[in-house]
Image (tube, rainbow, N blue to C red):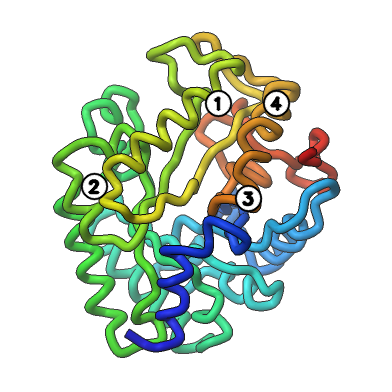
Amino acid sequence: MQVRYLAIVLGVLTATSFSQAIQGFNYGSTSNDGSCQSYGGFKGLFERAKNLPGASGFTAARLYTSIQCGTVAEPTEAYQAAIDTDTKILVGLWASAGRDVFEDELKALITAARTLSTAFTDRIIGISVGSEDLYRSSSLGIANNAGEGATAAELQGYIGWLRDWTRGTLLEGIPITHVDTWNAWMRPENRGVIEAIDFLGHNSFPYFENAMPNAIEKASDHFWFAVGVTESVAQGKPVWVTETGWPDTGPVHRDAVPSLENAKTYWKTIGCSLFGKRNIFWYTLVDAAMTNSDLSFAITPAYSATPKFDLACY
């Protein structure tokens, strides 16, 4: 392991849950109108995140793919935008489209490391192999028509592949993770994925937890219950909150009502309890292209840097 990444690993395991906690948003590869997000779009969003009225410290970006939208295996232009805005990156490698596409993800990442060098790799805080693939491949995900996923065995293979390809490169030793939901992490058949990674990415949306009463008043209880479940199976490894939020627009899910007031309450209750204390990527700064165009988790409109509600934590 390269010495300069030993510090990153130690940071992941210890200090980041305290004064050095990582704070950022999730960013898709497309804009809200479905067009491919470009360098200028990423750069503008990263700058917006750093300068939010009433909020500070959003200096990191979580990505879902390393491939620039509209290409086969070109590195995402978000990487250059992150360099130019001094934004930390949780790299994403999409893992639910088969081996050929995952190989393209690896090629894009390796190319970026080679061409952008340490200006890029020094800003990487982790590499995520997949996002909610285990959930989507589970019986629950299938019942919810969540889309294509990947099995634990497939993800373990991809993680090994990533470690092999990055050995001897500037990427060697960067902490590796997988992102999923609490009800995927708790399944015994997924234990091998936990063993293969350095920390766990945890996605939690009480809004969608419609198997139980889930009004906004119950959101805090549901959120911390889910975190606790993931931590209980994490084998002592750190758990990062990689997605959470509450929509201001969308359908009612049992007792969960989307509204600006409820989105604000969730930010103030959950967000403010996490910011500066745990590694957290909020969902989301702006909406990307969505299957359901009536569902919005964004805290700012697509074309305005003005937040939809007061973001100050007191």
- How far apart in space, not on screen, are marks 2 and 1 (Cα)? 30 Å
Of mark 3 and mark 1, the one earlier in the sequence is: 3
Marks 3 and 4: which is nearer the front? 4
- How far apart in space, not on screen, are marks 3 and 1 (Cα)? 30 Å
Are dots 4 and 1 in contact, CB under 8 Å? no
Q: Is residue 179 above or below residue 142?
A: below
* Residue for badge 2: 150
Marks 2 and 1: which is nearer the front? 1
Quadrant placement of the C terminus: top right
Q: Is residue 38 above or below residue 136?
A: below
Q: Is residue 300 left or right of residue 281?
A: right
Residue type, mark 1 in image: Ser
Residue type, mark 2 in image: Ala
Q: Residues within 10 Å of mark 1 (few under 14, many from 20)?
A: some
Q: Nearer the viewer, residue 225 or 118?
A: 225
Are dots 3 and 2 in contact, CB under 8 Å? no
Picture quarter containing residue 264? top right
Of mark 4 and mark 2, the one earlier in the sequence is: 2
Of mark 3 and mark 4, the one earlier in the sequence is: 3
